[in-house]
Amino acid sequence: MEITRCTITFDAADVQLEAAFWAALFDGVSEGDHQWRVVRAPDGTVPVGVQLAQRHRVEPQWPGKPADTHLDLWVSDIDAAHEEALAHGAELLQPAAGGENFHVYASPSGHPFCLCWPVEQLSA
């Protein structure tokens, strides 16, 4: 098998809202229609897709009930990334604690993701 591309696809009741959220985080653009959209990153890759699931809403239960899948997004400036994620509609579910180098968030449709930073930045 030769895999030529991989895109993570999220279900959402509001495809436009969810795709706009991920496009903002990836500094990309949302392309498609009301049933299926992709996020095209500045380098041309398509890291995220969003498909219509009319009654979909994930109720984040982090950390009580772990998610089956989530994205780890590595950032160079966690303070700026945190503020940007919140400004685009993310919900902070669990801030880093005790030497952890990640915060856990939910997208507008409730999909969990982490903003992670290099361990050497923990002392900052």
Image (cartoon, rainbow, N blue to C red):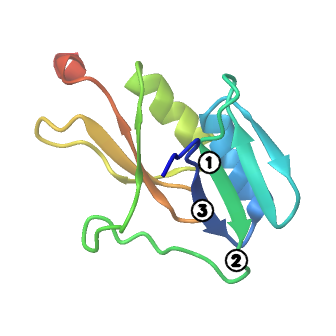
Quadrant assignment for the C terminus: top left
Which residue sits at x=40%, y=19%? 76
Distance from Cα at disc 3 to Cα at disc 2: 9 Å
* Image point (75%, 62%), residue name: 15
- Position of 60 relative to 43 (above/below): below
Residue 109: x, y in percent? 60, 65
| Residue 123: quarter of image | top left
| Residue sticking out furthest to the right | 33
Task: Determine the residue positioned at 48% across, 52% down.
Answer: 1
Label 1, residues with CA under 10 Å away: few <14, some 14-19, many ≥20? many
- The dot on residue 97 is none
Residue kind at label 1, given as amino acid type: Val
| Numbered tag placed on residue 53 in the rendering | 2
Disc 2 is placed on an element classified as loop
Label 2 with label 1: CB-CB less than 8 Å? no
- Amino acid type at mark 3: Phe
Residue 19 picture location, percent across and down: 71, 51
For the residue carrying disc 2, how many other residues have a C-alpha within 10 Å: few (<14), some (14-19), or many (20+)?
some
Few, some or many residues within 10 Å of mark 3 (<14, 14–19, 20+): some
Q: Mark 1 points at which residue?
A: 48
The disc at residue 10 is 3
Residue farthest to the front, as pictured? 1
